[in-house]
Image: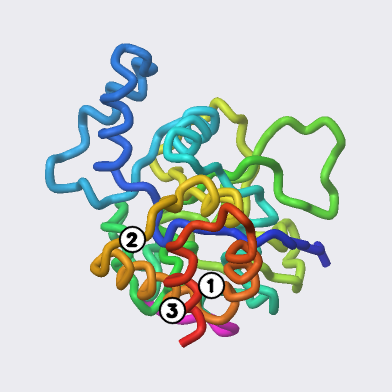
Amino acid sequence: MVTIDVREPLLVDSFEVTRAEWLGYQRSLGSAVAPELLAHTAEWSADSGEWPACFMTQPEAEAFASAVGMRLPRAGEWIFIACGPQALPFPWGATAQRSVANTLELGLARAVAVGTFEAGRSPQRVYDLLGNVAEWSADLAPERDLLAGDERVSVLGGSYHNRARAVIDPRLIEGQSELFARALSRESRADDVGLRCVANAAEYLVARLPRERPERALARRYEALGHRWGVPARGLLEELSRRADASPALEFLLAGASR
């Protein structure tokens, strides 16, 4: 059984990066866009802005994440996000379910808007961890038979091209990895591989929270966000609140997490 160990609190995008988000970033690059990527994104229809972006290489995905102050998850982190500390087989729980993810069985043969499958989200409200598009990671999944020097990286979770299967399946079906992952060259492109961003929570909050006390409307939004994060976030928020340079916004995040 592969062991996954994630000790640092993470902030995780609820949704895969959308086509609209990717195109906004791509326009900011000007002429510094690979011709094949430019040609592919030019074919995206105007009404598909909420579909997950795809066809970028892993370094291009990393560059997007860095541009928004985040990063790609390491493969072990991605698996922890999808399966939780209990190492559940599926993002939503312990048993297989029908029609809760955009996989081959649905027969759509394309991506759909992120967040479409409400019943398929994780308890932490992270959507589309199984199906829709597979997602780039920063490294190679911790397989039992991993070879030293393998420079590929993992894409995880499968897509609309793949049949549904458990993210972690310790039954070791012959010829199949126990993790729902495949290894690709970093320079690969595919119409069913996209990305989701994460950030180290403490670093991100210290860098991004305002130095001034938020106005009432914004304070309520921080409190609602803290409530959504819930009790698991209290320890980190309390720790950050004790810092001499603590943002006043932490008061409202902590109040929400404590409700």
Cα distance between the residues tagged 1 and 3: 25 Å
Give the vertical position of 179 relative to 227 (above or below). above
> For residue 53, which quarter of the picture?
top left
Residue designated by label 2: 214
Residue 78 sits in quarter: bottom right
Q: With 72 as the anchor, is 227 left or right in this view?
A: left
Q: Amino acid at mark 2?
A: Pro
Start and end of the magenta stretch?
93-99
Which of the two labelled residues, at mark 1 and mark 3, occupies the earlier sequence position?
A: 1
**What secondary structure is found at the residue carrying circle 2?**
loop
**In the foreground, 232 or 144:** 232
Task: Name the residue at the left extreme.
Answer: 46
**Magenta region, main secondary structure:** loop
At label 3, the amino acid type is: Gly
**Is residue 207 magenta-colored?**
no
Looking at the image, tell me whether mark 2 or mark 3 is earlier in sequence order: 2
- The answer to whether the residues at label 2 and label 3 have Cβ atoms under 8 Å apart is no
Indicate the secondary structure of the residue bearing disc 3: helix
Q: Nearer the viewer, mark 2 or mark 1?
A: 2
Question: Regarding mark 1 in the picture, which secondary structure is present there?
Answer: loop
**Residue placed under numbered mark 3 in the picture:** 256
Image quarter of the N terminus: bottom right
Instruction: Report the amino acid beneath label 1.
Output: Pro
Q: Position of residue 37 (x, y in %)?
A: 35, 24
Residue occupying image coordinates x 70% and y 59% = 8
Q: Give the labeled residue for mark 1.
A: 91
Tell me the colour scheme of the image: rainbow
